[in-house]
Image: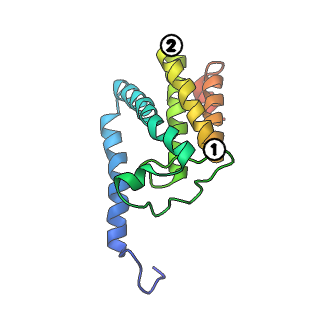
Amino acid sequence: AFAAEPRPAPLLAVGYLAAAWGLPWLLGRVYFASAEGRLLLVKGLVVSGLACLPFSLIEGALGPVVYDAVYETHPFRADGAIRYLGFRPLGLFENGNQFGLWISLSALAALWLGIASGAARWRWAAAILVAMALAAQSIGAIALLALGAASLWAFGLVRPRLVATG
């Protein structure tokens, strides 16, 4: 609205954002509307987080190299990649912060499955994903993971609706 020559063109930018964010949201509302669909979504989140483990190990030690090997040099390759200890993985995500949020969300999903089902495989997945989230060193994502884990713990003590309202 304020740039003389906006790049990309406004309609192209709107189309990109609608396809990248709006379409997945709409499909999620359609496919995960039932309890079975939501359980499938949570399991899919856990599996997708575990699928990030190979490139997380590689990029944690070497820096962001997977995207470069598959496509070309990532435009935000160095944006926050160097962490206190090693590197934050990037994989095929748009940004390292996006990776940190995804892994933390996957860890929270695994924690919930471990609590809800009591199955050892989900507890192992939760342990691996929490370790991955901590290793990514994305402070905001770790804080959200801690808040979500505290909420899961509180849901066991108090009715979830009261905790969510609080």
Q: Which residue is mark 1?
A: 137
* Residue lying farthest to the bottom in this orientation: 4
Q: Which residue is mark 2?
A: 120
In percent of the image, x 49 and y 41: which residue is there? Answer: 58
Q: Count up the numbered dots.
A: 2
Q: Which mark is residue 2?
A: none
Q: Amino acid at mark 1?
A: Gln
Q: Secondary structure at mark 2?
A: helix
Q: Nearer the viewer, residue 20 or 137?
A: 137
Q: Residues under labels 2 and 1: Cα distance?
A: 26 Å
Q: Secondary structure at mark 1?
A: loop
* Residue lying farthest to the right in this orientation: 84
* Residue lying farthest to the front in this orientation: 62
Based on the displayed image, in which of its 4 quarters is residue 10 positioned? bottom left
Image x and y of residue 69, in percent: 38, 52
Mark 1 nearby-residue class (10 Å; few <14, some 14–19, many ≥20): many
Based on the displayed image, in which of its 4 quarters is residue 166 positioned? top right
Query: Taking 18 as reference, is 55 above or below it?
Result: above
